[in-house]
Image (tube, rainbow, N blue to C red):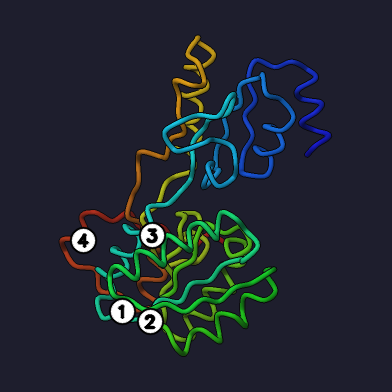
Amino acid sequence: LNSICSEVVGSEPDIILPIATGPSQIAATTTSEIPIVFSCVTDPVEAGLTPSWEEAGKNVTGVSDMADIESIIDFALQLYPETKTVGIVYNSAEVNSQVQVELCKEVLEKKGLDYKEGTITNTSELQQVVENLAVDVDIFYSPTDNDVASAMPAFQQVANKHNLPIFPGASTMVESGGTGTVGLDYYDLGLQAGEMVVRILNGESVADNPPETVEKVTKILNQDQVEALGIVVSAELEKEVEYVTTQE
């Protein structure tokens, strides 16, 4: 990444579009002059890319994929109103995951819910971590965590065995085996970042474009999981939900 960013900066582009936190951080340390518009950075403030959510960095701004965690928990409670304990599964080394988990804990505490954490350092640990948590929790939550996302089929397999739903932070994680979320579409995220790029290329300053979150979110349910877990969706909620099926 360091080599690639140096090469990109050396070619003197008008703007740089890194995707995800690591590439964005390296791009920002490689140039302080060329405008940078990131996407898929969950918390640009924690990542050191912008001083706040209301203010762009010197030459850095972009669109975050931060999930509305309270909306996800509220959605889960609509489907599982008897929930008392939430199992939180994430990679403890991912900064983005740590940020989302802390926010989730605050939401759960505010709602009077208990939680138990299960942390992994790689995908091979996920199955056992979920097995250990399953006996003590009513539902699972996972942030937009890269390792958990890549191991969703294994997560789903263990959770289904215990008849427990998974409410992850991203719609793509529902498509790969999660139960439901209030999520963003990464196409919409890319489109929104592209619109920001156009504004800057057309003369607006980076300073006039503070970091954004995705404006459009949707309640998403995995139809296969609804059937497998016997979830009853009320007629009122049915009107708000978009269904997906598990993608192999």
Image coords of residue 52 (percent x, y): 47, 38
The alpha-carbon separation of the residues under discs 1 and 4 comes to: 18 Å
Closer to the camera in the image, 170 or 88:
88
The alpha-carbon separation of the residues under discs 2 and 3 comes to: 16 Å
- In front: label 4 or label 2: 2
Q: Please say if the residues under marks 4 and 2 sit with CB atoms less than 8 Å apart.
A: no
Q: Secondary structure at mark 1?
A: loop
Q: Amino acid at mark 1?
A: Thr
Residue that badge 3 annotates: 181
Circle nearer the N terminus (1, 4): 1
Q: Residue at x 55, y 43 (%)?
A: 41
Image coords of residue 39 (percent x, y): 55, 37
Q: Please say if the residues under marks 2 and 1 sit with CB atoms less than 8 Å apart.
A: yes
The alpha-carbon separation of the residues under discs 4 and 3 comes to: 13 Å
Residue that badge 1 annotates: 83
Q: Amino acid at mark 4?
A: Leu
Left or right, 72 with respect to 22, comes to left
Left or right, 29 with respect to 76, comes to right
Closer to the camera in the image, 230 or 2:
2
The alpha-carbon separation of the residues under discs 4 and 2 comes to: 21 Å
Q: Residue at x 32, y 68 (%)?
A: 76
Residue that badge 2 annotates: 138
Q: Residue at x 44, y 69 (%)?
A: 141
Q: Which mark is residue 172?
A: none
Q: Residue at x 74, y 15 (%)?
A: 12
Q: Secondary structure at mark 3?
A: strand
Residue that badge 4 annotates: 237
The residue most toward the front is 51
Circle nearer the N terminus (4, 3): 3
- In front: label 1 or label 3: 1
